[in-house]
């Protein structure tokens, strides 16, 4: 029985599918869990158990009442047509079911299963490239699914990819994918102990072994026989595995092992396994009979195979198989080869006559079968076209009705709006007048409150600043004018110095208040003085008196090109702003260093004042430039120096900012525009 290679592959593949379905039913090993199957699903499955045509009617009825969504309807139609042997129709409906992501969102396992089935159909058709593309597309989707089920389907789809690659002679790629799929399913099975995972592991291991034997890769098949044996033994040991499933898997494993052994030159071992196989109950079953025939053919035991032909013929007749090309290639031609090679020429001649007589029937069957499938496809598409046309007509009617309704509503609203507009316009004008007056009053009130608050704050702060030196002056006045008070020369000198300092303090406060008053102006200061950076720096240093401060080490640093750099500014105001920065550094640095660094940038000159004093928190970088702000109440002062300095510099076209990256104290950067 010298079968065509493709016929062998096809027959074994169909057997594998039938075996998988039967085992799933027998052991409740379906990937559709109880949770996933609702009442409507159960109606379809019940109908499929009895009559496929009746099942199609049930699906049509469920579609009419919208009990199932479109993708699910197409999935069931694909399943039914596939079981009826109508692969073209099944292919059409599987593709429809996989359009969009309805099925994936509802039941990912059915979604993956549909892809698996579609890939199988394309494989049977001989479209290996199409089957490979389909399985690859499904695998890329499943890779994103991190659930247990998603990982399982990744492995199953990867095994589908490997099967297609084997048919395309891409053996190295197939081996890699088979190994990954096998290891993933093995890990899931051993980690979880779930029967579904164990069953998938065994089924995929069997299919991989089968892929190598049907493509005559017997050396590689030898390794996969061992792998399949491990998985199948674990399946058989499971308490959920039925006796029938165990017998079928063990029997098929035995025949495959015998085939591999005989093709690798180990005939004695192969014959022993075959003899053990014949003792099993499985060898008496229809599928066991097919396995036995396959082994006898590959072992070239033509007499034994010829003796088996009557049983095989009877089996094929009992299945009521149509006289198709598949029937011709899988049964009649192998029968002829068995009789001829065993020397039974009379029976070989009779079988040849049956083949000749069947050719016309085969052609007629294929023509009718294909025509019936095409009719179903045409009818389906015609029905869909009618539905689409009806939906378009209904949509147009809805659009027309909605348009008329909208037009009437718009006309009514226009009339209503016009009357409302006329009646409300006068009211709106009056309301607007009232609102305007109310806004003006609100603004005036807010300004009055703000002015009052500012005055209160101002008076409170200034009274404190003036009261301190006045109290000191008053105290010394009482000492000087007191009776019986005799003062030495040093004491008199100290009192004169104290009176002078506090008088200067009051004068300085008055001057700062005048500066603050001027600083609040937005008037731009005229820049008509042509001076140098060195002159401004020297004058500010002198005015600040920082060189005469014992507790501070002062350093002036002029970067290259800045010492005699000329700029057009207001020398008095620029110097005053820098003096205020130096005073601030002197005030908040009890012991340490103060540096004045002059540098230049592309469009401006920078006067940088650094100190090693108490520093300023980054979050207060802007707050310190507000008038009367003092971060440390233990330091004397009005808190207006930085505010005045920034106002002056901004009116000169520059700015003053606090460099928050400096961590050793405080660093203020005063910039003036480069205008020469």
Image: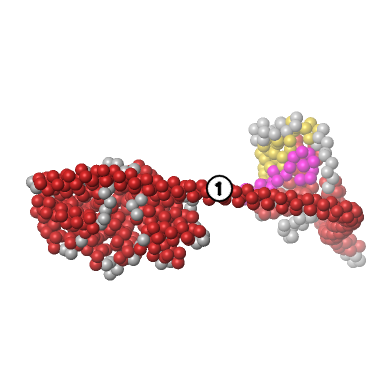
Camera-nearest residue between 513 and 203:
203
Give the position of the C terminus as an image quadrant: top right
Q: Position of residue 412 (x, y in %)?
A: 79, 53
| Structural crowding at the residue carrying mark 1, measured as other residues with C-alpha within 10 Å and reported as few (<14), some (14–19) or many (≥20) | few
Q: Position of residue 654 (x, y in %)?
A: 74, 40
Q: Is residue 673 left or right of residue 440?
A: left
Q: Is residue 140 visible?
A: no
Camera-nearest residue between 173 and 53:
53
Residue 118 in the magenta stretch? The answer is: no
Camera-nearest residue between 654 and 275:
275
Circle 1: element type:
helix
Q: Is residue 85 visible?
A: yes
Q: Position of residue 313 (x, y in %)?
A: 19, 54
Kindly identify which residue carries mark 1.
Answer: 389
Q: Residue at x 13, y 45 (%)?
A: 349
Q: Which range is magenta?
A: 646-669
Q: Residue at x 75, y 52 (%)?
A: 408
């Amino acid at each position: 029985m010298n079968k065509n290679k493709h016929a062998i592959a096809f027959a074994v593949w169909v057997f594998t599918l039938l075996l998988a379905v039967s085992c799933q039913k027998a052991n409740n090993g379906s990937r559709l869990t109880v949770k996933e199957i609702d009442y409507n699903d159960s109606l379809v499955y019940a109908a499929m158990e009895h009559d496929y045509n009746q099942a199609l009617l049930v699906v049509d009825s469920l579609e009419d009442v919208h009990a199932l969504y479109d993708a699910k309807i197409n999935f069931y139609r694909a399943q039914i047509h596939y079981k009826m042997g109508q692969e073209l129709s099944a292919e059409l409906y599987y593709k429809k079911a996989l359009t969009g992501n309805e099925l994936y969102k509802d039941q990912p396992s059915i979604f993956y299963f549909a892809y698996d089935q579609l890939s199988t159909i394309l494989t049977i058709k001989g479209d290996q490239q199409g089957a490979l593309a389909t399985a690859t597309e499904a695998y890329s989707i499943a890779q994103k699914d991190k659930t247990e089920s998603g990982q399982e389907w990744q492995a199953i789809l990867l095994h589908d990819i490997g099967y297609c690659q084997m048919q395309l002679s891409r053996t190295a790629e197939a081996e890699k994918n088979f190994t990954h799929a096998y290891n993933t399913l093995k890990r899931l099975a051993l980690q979880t102990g779930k029967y579904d995972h164990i069953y998938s592991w065994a089924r995929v291991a069997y299919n991989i072994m089968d892929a190598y034997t049907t493509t005559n890769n017997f050396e590689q098949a030898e390794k996969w026989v061992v792998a399949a044996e491990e998985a199948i033994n674990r399946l058989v040991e499971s308490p959920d595995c039925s006796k029938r499933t165990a017998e079928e898997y063990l029997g098929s494993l035995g025949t495959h092992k015998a085939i591999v052994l005989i093709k690798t030159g180990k005939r004695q071992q192969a014959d022993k396994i075959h003899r053990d196989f014949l003792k099993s109950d499985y060898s008496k079953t229809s599928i066991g009979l097919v396995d036995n025939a396959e082994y006898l053919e590959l072992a070239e035991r033509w007499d034994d195979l010829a003796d088996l032909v009557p049983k095989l013929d009877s089996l094929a007749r009992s299945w009521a198989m149509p006289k198709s090309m598949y029937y011709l290639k899988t049964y009649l031609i192998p029968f002829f080869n068995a009789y001829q090679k065993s020397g039974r020429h009379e029976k070989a001649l009779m079988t040849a006559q049956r083949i000749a007589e069947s050719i016309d029937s085969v052609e007629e069957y294929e023509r009718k079968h294909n025509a019936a499938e095409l009719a179903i496809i045409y009818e389906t598409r015609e029905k869909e076209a009618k539905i689409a046309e009806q939906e378009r007509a209904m949509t147009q009617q809805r659009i027309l009705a909605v348009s008329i309704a909208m037009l009437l509503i718009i006309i009514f609203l226009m009339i209503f709006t016009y009357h409302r507009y006329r009646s409300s316009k006068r009211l709106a004008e009056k309301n607007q007048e009232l609102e305007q007056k109310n806004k003006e009053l609100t603004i005036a009130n807010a300004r009055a409150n703000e002015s009052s608050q500012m005055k209160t704050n101002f008076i409170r702060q200034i009274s404190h600043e003036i009261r301190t030196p006045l109290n000191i002056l008053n105290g010394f006045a009482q000492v000087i004018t007191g009776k019986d008070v005799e003062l030495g020369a040093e004491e008199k000198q100290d009192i004169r110095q104290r009176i002078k300092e506090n008088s200067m303090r009051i004068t300085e406060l008055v001057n700062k208040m005048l500066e603050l008053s001027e600083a609040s102006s937005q008037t731009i200061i005229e820049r008509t003085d042509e001076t140098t950076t060195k002159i401004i720096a020297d004058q500010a240093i002198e005015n600040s008196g920082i060189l005469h401060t014992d507790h501070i080490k002062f350093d002036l640093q002029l970067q290259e090109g800045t010492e005699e750099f000329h700029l057009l500014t207001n020398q008095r105001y620029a110097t005053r702003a820098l003096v205020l920065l130096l005073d601030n550094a002197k005030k908040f640095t009890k012991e340490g260093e103060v540096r004045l660094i002059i540098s230049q940038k592309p469009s401006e000159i920078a006067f940088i004042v650094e100190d090693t004093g108490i520093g300023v928190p980054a979050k207060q970088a802007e707050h310190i430039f507000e008038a009367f702000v003092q971060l440390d109440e233990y330091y004397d002062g009005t808190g207006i120096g930085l505010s005045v300095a920034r106002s002056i510099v901004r009116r000169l076209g520059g700015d003053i900012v606090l460099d928050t990256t400096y961590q050793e104290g405080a660093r203020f950067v005063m910039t003036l525009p480069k205008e020469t």
